[in-house]
Image (spheres, rainbow, N blue to C red):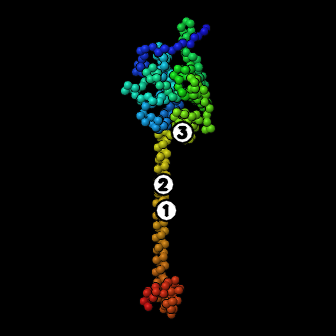
Amino acid sequence: MTHAKIKIDVPQPFLDHTHLPDEDGTFVKNFQEHPQSILLTDSIGAILQQRHPDGNYAIGQDSGIYWRQTEPPEKGAEAPDWFYVPNVPPLLDGEFRRSYCLWQEPTPPLIALEFASGDGTEELDKTPLSVSPDGKTTKPGKFWVYEQIIQIDYYGIYIVKTGNLQMYHLENNSYRQMSPNERGHYLIEPLGIELGKWEGFYQNQALSWLRWWDSEGNLLLTGAEGKEIEKARAEKETARAEAETARAEAETARGDRLANELEQERQARRSAIPQLLATGMSVEQVAQILSLTIEEVRKISGS
């Protein structure tokens, strides 16, 4: 049976995001999916605020991107586990998006990530949309939809079970697999940041997570991590200040002790003057023995 590729014509009028399903009734595929999305969103926030001081960007987490009208409607959508769209308002017509409709907002995501529970076959499916002579439509593969229809600039497939990350960049309307840099990261050039794997503990799970780094290889922190570092820095500064205060107090106490010892020694010398003079020593001899001046001896003895 032969299949002919069809041209996709968007019928009008099309439903908007408030009329389309915002879920397909399936379960989340693994317990890592939602924490992974939250980790990516939380740690990239500061970068996106710098890039979009007007706040015009959107992040989707397991949210539908509608690219064609079908029946049922969800068959005409793909739902990346995480994606970012630049230069779109945070609200659409004053409402939170329930989904992202390309016929309503033509700006495609800059990056989409899939957290594959299987071996990545579904995420790498390049089957094109086609119809047979009898009118039967072939379901297109996710890879093909992202590459040929939505045209997402950066597409990442993270196979959770093996920890394998594959990144693709759209070049001349075709995905080309990217190579990691010397740090094992993938540069997302428009944002000036890198995506890579990080071994660590997050939300009660010690796993290999996808994380962001800046172009110099510094890990982008979550809000909680930033607070912990700031807390540790503050505690370190407090400890340093306390140590400096203790050192100053110890130095003051040492100075007071030395002053007291010198005064006691001086008093002892003065007390010894009458006794030594009584033995018949001269003022000069007493001054020499006690390391005092002749004037001091004479003043104290009254001679």
Q: Which mark is residue 239?
A: 2
Marks 1 and 2, Cα distance to the nearest angstrom?
Answer: 12 Å
Residue 264 vertical position relative to residue 5 in the rendered view, above or below? below
| Residue 160, percent from left and from top | 58, 30
Mark 2 belongs to which amino acid? Answer: Ala
**x 61%, y 28%: residue:** 177
302 vs 128, left or right, is left
The disc labelled 3 sits on which kind of residue?
Asp
Q: Pointer 3: residues within 10 angstroms few (<14), some, or many (20+)? A: some
- The nearer-to-camera label among 3 and 1 is 3
Q: Which mark is residue 247?
A: 1
Tell whether label 2 touches label 3 (CB within 8 Å).
no
Q: Amino acid at mark 1?
A: Arg
Q: Is residue 293 visible?
A: yes
Instruction: Give the CA separation, mark 3 to mark 1.
Output: 40 Å
Q: Residue 158 appears at what percent x and percent y?
A: 57, 29
Tell me the residue at 49%/41% (across/down).
225
Does residue 201 appear anywhere in the picture? no
State the quadrant of the C terminus. bottom left
On residue 214, which mark appears? 3
Q: Secondary structure at mark 3?
A: strand
**In the depicted structure, whether residue 36 falls above or below residue 286:** above
State the SS at label 2: helix
